[in-house]
Amino acid sequence: MATAHSKTAARLMISPAVLLLLGWMLVPLGMTIYFSLLRYNLLMPGMESFTGLDNYRYFLTDPAFYAAFKNTLLLVGGVLLITTVGGVLLALLLDQDFWGQGIVRILTIAPFFVMPTVSALVWKNMFMNPVNGLFAYLFQALGLEPYDWLGSAPLFSIIWMVSWTWLPFATLILLTALQSLDREQIEAAEMDGAGALARFFYITVPHLSRAATVVVLIETIFLLSVFAEILVTTNGGPGYASTNITYLVYAQSLLQFDVGGGAAGGIVAVVLANIVAIFLMRMIGKNLDA
Amino acid sequence: MSRRSSTRRKALMTVLAWAVGLLLFFPILWTVLTSFKTEAVAIADPPVWFNFDWTLENYATVQERSNYGRHFWNSVVVSVGSTLLGVIIAVPAAWAMAFVPGKRTRDILMWMLSTKMLPPVGVLIPIYLIFRNLGLLDTRIGLVIVLMLINLPIIVWMLYTYFKEIPGEILEASRMDGAGLREEILYVLTPMAVPGIASTLLLNVILAWNEAFWTLNLTAAKAAPLTAFIASYSSPEGLFYAKLSAASTMAIAPIMILGWFSQKQLVRGLTFGAVK
Amino acid sequence: MGSITLSKITKTFGPKEVIPPLDLQINEGEFVVFVGPSGCGKSTLLRLIAGLEDVTSGQISINGEEVTLAPPAKRGLAMVFQSYALYPHMSVKKNIAFPLKMAKKSQSEIDEKVTNAAKVLNLTEYLDHRPGQLSGGQRQRVAIGRAIVREPAAFLFDEPLSNLDAALRVNMRAEISDLHRQLETTMIYVTHDQVEAMTMADKIVVLQAGRIEQVGAPLELYETPRNKFVAGFIGSPRMNFIEGHEAAKHDAHTIGIRPEHLTISTESGAWQGKVGLAEHLGSDTFLRVDAGPLGELTVRAIGDVKVKYGDTVFLSPDPSKIHRFDAGGLALR
């Protein structure tokens, strides 16, 4: 299939996509790196000056960064824990034989299609509001004090909302993987005398581990960039209690107009994301030619 | 093949599965119900479930007060526009990688994927400044370009995995039959890949519709799609549950319908073919 | 119309040489079969002729005109693929019409040619079907139809029958041979099945590891194989090879004797052995005989021979049919 003619054509046809992505990646990233070395505030135009690594020093030693870093880890870790454990359980449940499988599947996947701003506002107002929210009503009905979710446990509340979006994703992927498991393999194990538990741990779990890894890695990429949910619910507060790195960089850049500091933060975020990306790419790369 | 499943077990599973399904779906259901209530009923204590006077008033008010239709249209233009543009650019690239693989094809694919992993805050400032200088802030065309670029790797990847499933011999046959490159792609590859291209379109429209970083940061009143419009309800004065619900229902309904159609492809697209 | 000349062509994939320098002349109207074990380079050779792969060096000419660098569409060849490679989204009619449409022929000419081809190939009633609705044999005929409407300089067949079941394969073999007689166009046919080669070819090209081992008419290869490889590859069951003392008696390193040239007897003969396996087909009997120092010999006897596992039998070779080879495997004449 490879002649010199078709190779030239291939190069030509691939180049628009490559050039666009190259431009999209290199130009802004280069600018971010450049800005991160400047003292540059949009409120004081024309005052830019080179400061070396100062921005990084300020950003990394700022207590806000420490808080945001911790929150980012908790947010990503918390959502991953809830969605993968919950996803495995849900996938196992949905894989069972029951009436109305199609409808239940649709109900389960639905939250994934809800845009982040809608999901955040619905949870914030209609469920977590300490006066009018359904949770407050539920607590009262049980004789408990209504709880101010976003005020008292902002990070947990956000983890809750984000998990609601991503649990269906994890479930769907794990369910797909589960259904691709060769039934004959299970039957062979049954013939070999493996009980239900043994079959689960020796056949199902190894089969699911690959899909679970994919879920973890892909969710991580998206979860590192959680933004809208924070913006419309807590604005990162109270204090920095629900600020993650993405939101911190946004606040520094577009709320305080500190371009230099924001850029340094952006580069820090890129470095952190790359650490995850390397693992994810290894995973996907392995399957590329399979 | 046959598993011994007693009716009792099946009944138990049915109850369990439906309970979990409804629980997950409940926030959406509640939003839809609330959208038909009056504001007073919406915050009634105890909550009202079904027996209230159903009204469409909220939907009318949302449109009237905030020109909902324009934001809806912005969402349509931006998500469909960015996806179509992306597919036009991605089809030739995916053709090349699927059917004329070279030594570097694998690297290029992986590199494209890596651009998707770039956190948006890493390039927020330059993009914001470039957009400001080019007058692209708060324009639909600006959003179309950005969303096309962030989804391009997914589009290329999805098309690539679909094209890989088309036997190369068929394309060779068309070459033997005298088809040039243009005819080969237009008359043979594209029609055969229609299901794959359709799923790619669908998934990427969904992703672009729900994108909530760039849409929030690069638009204000004029070009704001629904993600940004809904965000305006976060201010305290926007605290009208019934109206928020009506606006939300309209924002998620179309995409939910598309989403249900594309469940299977969703898995493949979002895992870059690692899970099928 | 339809002569193809390959001169000194080579093909390398990376560091791997798939075709060492190779010369071959294919004459107008010939039915040429490339045969060899899998991986011998026969398909690559066909794809080089088709233009689906570039040659690394050397020249290809068709009808005296050099086409080494021409794209497939410009070579005036038609190809039938192993998987048939029909366009699944087009009807049979559109599949057959596709090359004509690409050549920008008028609609009336297209209709006429497609109708004719369909008639010749018994496809008339299936013209509006999609390939998915056809049987294997019908798909095969559509693929051939798509090839013949172009009136190519030569037809290229890449193992076209390997996806069909045994009975259908015999039929299609005959159909392709008939087609060749009707059209009198050059055909190049690639197969790993020596029976197809023997039954269809005017000229067989036996390939191994990209090299041509021998070129010749089917019976020529059967009767006077140039070396041990061709001797073993052509003919079924395979020729028996005997080395050592018995071969030395014939002044050779190795001697070869075909199973059908051994006579079996339960009383006397040149060589003695024990029956290992006996396959009684009625029309023929195939035996595997353990002949001690000579090794295992395969024997084919006409009709049914009443022997069974463990019986002692005697074998006598037809002395005029003994092939002699030197230590390098070349035939001694």
Image (cartoon, grey):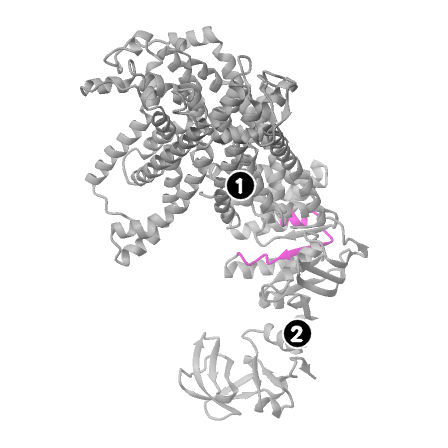
Is C155 colored magenta in this rendering? yes
Q: Nearer the viewer, residue B236 or B255?
A: B236
Judging from the image, what secondary structure is the residue with disc 1 in? helix
- Seen at 22% across and 18% down, the residue is A145
Which span of residues is magenta-colored? C145-163
- Seen at 45% across and 74% down, the residue is C281
- Seen at 54% across and 80% down, the residue is C259
Report in which chain the residue with disc 1 lies: B
From this viewpoint, is residue A226 visible?
no
Q: Which residue is mark 2?
A: C221
- For disc 1, the neighbor class at 10 Å (few under 14, some 14 to 19, many from 20) is many
Q: Is residue A35 above or below residue B139?
A: below
Q: Is residue A142 above or below residue C100?
A: above
Q: Is residue B169 above or below residue B260?
A: below
A110 left or right of C1? left
Q: Nearer the viewer, residue C144 or C184?
A: C144
Disc 2 vs disc 1: which is toward the camera?
1
x, y percent for residue C134? 52, 47
x, y percent for residue C292? 48, 88
x, y percent for residue B215? 52, 21
Report in which chain the residue with disc 2 lies: C
| Amino acid residing under circle 1 | Tyr
Q: CA distance from mark 2 to mark 1?
A: 47 Å
Judging from the image, what secondary structure is the residue with disc 2 in? helix
Q: Which residue is mark 1?
A: B162
Q: Are marks 2 and 1 in contact (CB under 8 Å)?
A: no
| Amino acid residing under circle 2 | Leu
Q: Is residue B207 above or below residue A88?
A: above
C58 left or right of B39? right
x, y percent for residue C115? 64, 43
Q: Nearer the viewer, residue B61 or C133?
A: B61
